[in-house]
Amino acid sequence: MIRLIATDIDGTLLSSTQRISPRNLAALTAARDAGIVVVPTSGRQPFSIVDVLGDTWLTDGIVIGANGGVGFDFAGDEVLFERLISVEAQTALFEALRERYPSIACVSVRDAGATFWPEAGYVGMMDPGDHGRGETLPHYPLEEVLGTPSLKLVVRGVDVTPEELRDEAERLSIPGVAASTSGAPFLEVAAAGVNKATGLELLCARLGIDRDEVIAFGDNNNDVEMIEWAGVGVAMGNALPEVQALADMVALTNDEDGLAVILEELAANEWRGLLG
């Protein structure tokens, strides 16, 4: 029986217009009313999850942000867990990447996602509203950016794609870090062993929920571990082909309310079993 729903946000719960549809919200509300825990699970920070879901009840409870690096309970205003990248690991990775791609700059995200600490040069590469930051941002010397452990290290350059940076980070195999992409125009780096699956595992241990009682929805590279870990892993119809290939099932796209369709069928089956 399903007891927890974990859903990625961008490209999964939200449509391509960055809105949650009434049908998706109604399906999640029915799940909540049936006693099922609903957990938005995102590369976004908790405050940024509020930016896109704050006009719904989905930010009244627990969210997982920073690709599994932080769990936050809005009801109790409490950080449930936070896993940080060491200074040594993030410095080694960034210096090695910059040697290969001199144009790159980075940001250290800290304090459960509340603090955004960009290196000089990074802000100029941002599009309006990137990272949920609409305000004028200061910048800091690289040694200050890298000199404190990060919840997430963000890296981008003008002449390199996030996927190229991810491939290079994987080739470097620097201990203590794990790199991923989410469809955003930058590389996202977490502490080694941190991903959406490990965040869900920590949360489920607190709640007494088994992985076989979890259904997870996602569409991108940073959803892979979560989809593989959950008892039922669902890739969206718009998901990357490699994500669809490893999922237990493929839903309709995010613009076709694919999440709601699956949840409605599960509800009709009293939240039991893997759908055919």
Image: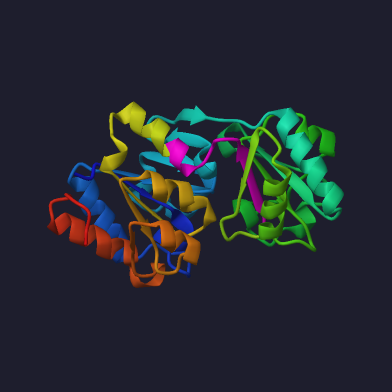
Foreground: 265 or 36?
265
Question: In x, y percent, where is residue 52?
Answer: 47, 55
Q: Does the magenta-highlighted stretch encompass residue 85?
A: no
Where is residue 11? Give x, y as percent: 47, 63
Front residue of 24 and 238: 238
Q: Is residue 139 visible?
A: no
Q: How is the image coloured?
A: rainbow
* Percent coordinates x, y for residue 145 in the rendering: 77, 36
Span colored in magenta:
186-199
Counting the numbered discs, the total is: 0
Which of these two is toward me, 212 or 102?
Answer: 212
> In this orientation, does residue 19 appear?
yes
Q: Which quadrant is the N terminus positioned in?
A: top left
| Residue occupying the far bottom of the picture | 256
Could you tell me residue 70's position as x and y percent?
51, 35
Image point 68% across, 58% down: which residue? 162
- Quarter of the figure with residue 151: top right
Residue 167 higher or lower than 260, as above or below:
above
